[in-house]
């Protein structure tokens, strides 16, 4: 049973996981959907009530039935590297590849449906609340008056995009910024705006969840930190990430979140306040982990490799002798 | 409790359902996401572990908590009608609208995740097989040799797109065509190709499923029909659709399909052969129904209105006194 990794050639973080899988002797096929209709090809036949499909990459043939897991890391746009790319060929290739893989019994990190849903920030905030994770008071609005009322109740605010990243190619992260006290909010009428109570943080927390495994890292805020620098991705602070314990109530909330979101992998960002409370900021279902592993030595790549290497549900069923249910 | 309909202004099929809902006194808000940041606005606040959100359209304010159902009919691209549309504003508006609605307790026809998954033709074929619906032998391939082998075993073939519709604006349906006996299949290497055994049909079947309700219509093939005209959407045959009974085994398979696909609405296309077998061709989760209702008089619009008007899960829970689970 093979592990399938969908990512681009430059993805060095995936390399870290491939090394682990190779060392444990688990077969791995790594390919980029951008190479479809060229270096990568596929075929699948539906006949007599059954399906038999194959993927071919770099001369290796793998049966769709023989996949134990699929890791959707940083795949390129299907058929993007043909001589004359087109929206039509991309759509056909995407449907053929993902349409067939969706019918396989493989476990996903993460399933495309779960991944897509998990990108919705408003949905994230609601789910975090329901899972008992503390969420800073947040307003998403197009009404200037609602923004003004909110700013009166919560005078110290940050503003950030609703969607996370600007959809240019490559996507660009938009920094979280502090709202000046004299903001008038009239521009809110021209586009939905996300305002959030600023957490006076003493540390940033990055919690990487892989299946049931939770690995948290903490980066202390400098004591002389500029309170206007709210976005850890854009600050120059050289203090490293350090491994830290996950408080039991946070662990419980995060596991509930992953279960409801049907995610096998999630990178959670929290802000730790002076009382030690971890405030949920977001969960990135495809968040990077290389920088945390480099700083902390936490075995994130190994944990991912172990998760991917576990037998597929179909394999376990054969071993157990139980029968397969409808997909 | 309100029914929310997301569709464009020109959608006359939605009008048929709105008339029914109005007649039964159920509050309806109909809006086009394309009008966001203008005629349509929204606001949502997350505070103290709870969420309160509102939509505003044509001067009417509706609480997200007060939605019993959401009908995703033919919605426009969010914020497409502003003076200066941009991918960024569309993404922000889409996330804000659908991100909030996803957190509401409303029932969906159809949920965006289920709708997206249901568009994958290869996944449809596999699911139909698993649900016991007869599927004509089908090959999706990029290997000319696999295509030639398949054509030897099944000499009478049609070819159709993997994805269904060309992604131009507006999308254009690509007709299913008969494969000539001397086809050499070399071009298969340049893009995934879907080949399917041609069913010598004596009728086309359109089965419209609304919740548990199944309404089937049958259009007999003309006795002198050209066997090269395989796509009912592109033939000039003037014979009308007539209501017909759903065979019990088909009903069972269709209901299993809808359950597994998590669809509340689906338009199934079958080809009926000389033995009376209904061969599954596809299920369009947003298929039109106006032309069937016009020909047959089947109460499809009324059935949709009744489904949408049912109390929301949250309302039923309040009535039952049971507690709400995590979303």
Image: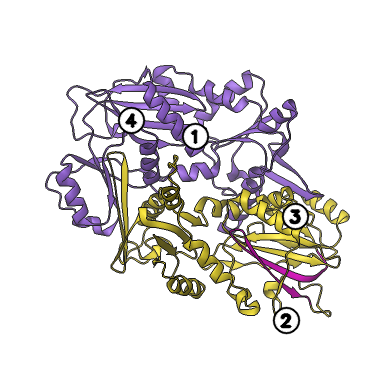
Chain colours: A purple, B yellow
- Which is more N-terminal, label 4 or label 1? 1
Find residue B133 and name its label.
3
Residue B326, quarter of picture: top left
Have a look at marks 2 and 1 and say if they share a chain: no
Residue B43 on the magenta segment: no
Q: Position of residue B258 (x, y in %)?
A: 62, 54
How many badges with numbers are in the image? 4
Q: CA distance from mark 3 to mark 2?
A: 27 Å
For the record, the magenta segment spans B199-221
- At numbered mark 1, what does the secondary structure look like: helix, strand or loop? helix
**Label 1 chain ID:** A
- At numbered mark 3, what does the secondary structure look like: helix, strand or loop? loop
Residue B1, quarter of picture: bottom left
* Mark 3 in CB contact with mark 2 (< 8 angstroms): no
Foreground: disc 4 or disc 2: 2
Seen in the picture, residue B10 relative to B312 is either above or below; the reply is below
């Amino acid at each position: 049973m093979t592990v399938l990794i969908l990512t681009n050639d430059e993805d060095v973080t995936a390399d870290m996981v491939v090394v682990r899988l190779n060392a444990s002797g688990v077969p791995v096929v790594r390919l980029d959907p951008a190479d479809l209709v060229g270096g990568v090809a596929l075929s699948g036949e539906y006949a007599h009530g059954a399906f038999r499909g194959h993927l071919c990459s770099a001369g290796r043939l793998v049966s769709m039935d023989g996949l134990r897991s699929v890791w959707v890391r940083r795949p390129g746009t299907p058929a993007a590297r043909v001589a004359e790319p087109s929206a039509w060929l991309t759509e056909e290739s995407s449907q053929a590849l993902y349409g067939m893989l969706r019918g396989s019994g493989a476990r996903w990190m993460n399933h495309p449906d779960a991944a897509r849903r998990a990108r919705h920030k408003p949905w994230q905030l609601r789910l975090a609340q329901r899972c008992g994770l503390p969420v800073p008071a947040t307003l998403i609005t197009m009404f200037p008056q609602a923004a003004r009322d909110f700013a009166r109740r919560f005078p110290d605010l940050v503003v950030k995009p609703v969607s996370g990243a600007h959809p240019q190619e490559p996507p660009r992260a938009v920094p979280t910024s502090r709202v000046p006290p004299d903001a008038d909010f009239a521009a809110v009428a021209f586009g939905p705006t996300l305002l959030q109570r600023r957490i006076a943080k003493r540390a940033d927390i990055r919690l990487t969840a892989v299946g049931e495994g939770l690995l948290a890292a903490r980066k202390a805020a400098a004591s002389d930190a500029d309170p206007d620098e709210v976005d850890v991705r854009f600050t120059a602070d050289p203090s490293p990430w350090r491994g830290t314990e996950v408080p039991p109530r946070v662990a419980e909330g995060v596991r509930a979140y992953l279960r409801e979101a049907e995610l096998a992998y999630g990178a959670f960002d929290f802000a730790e306040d002076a009382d030690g409370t971890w405030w949920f900021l977001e969960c990135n279902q495809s968040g990077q982990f290389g920088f945390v592993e480099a700083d902390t030595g936490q075995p994130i790549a190994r944990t991912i490799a172990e998760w991917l290497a576990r037998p597929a549900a179909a394999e376990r069923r054969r071993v157990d002798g139980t029968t397969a249910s409808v997909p």
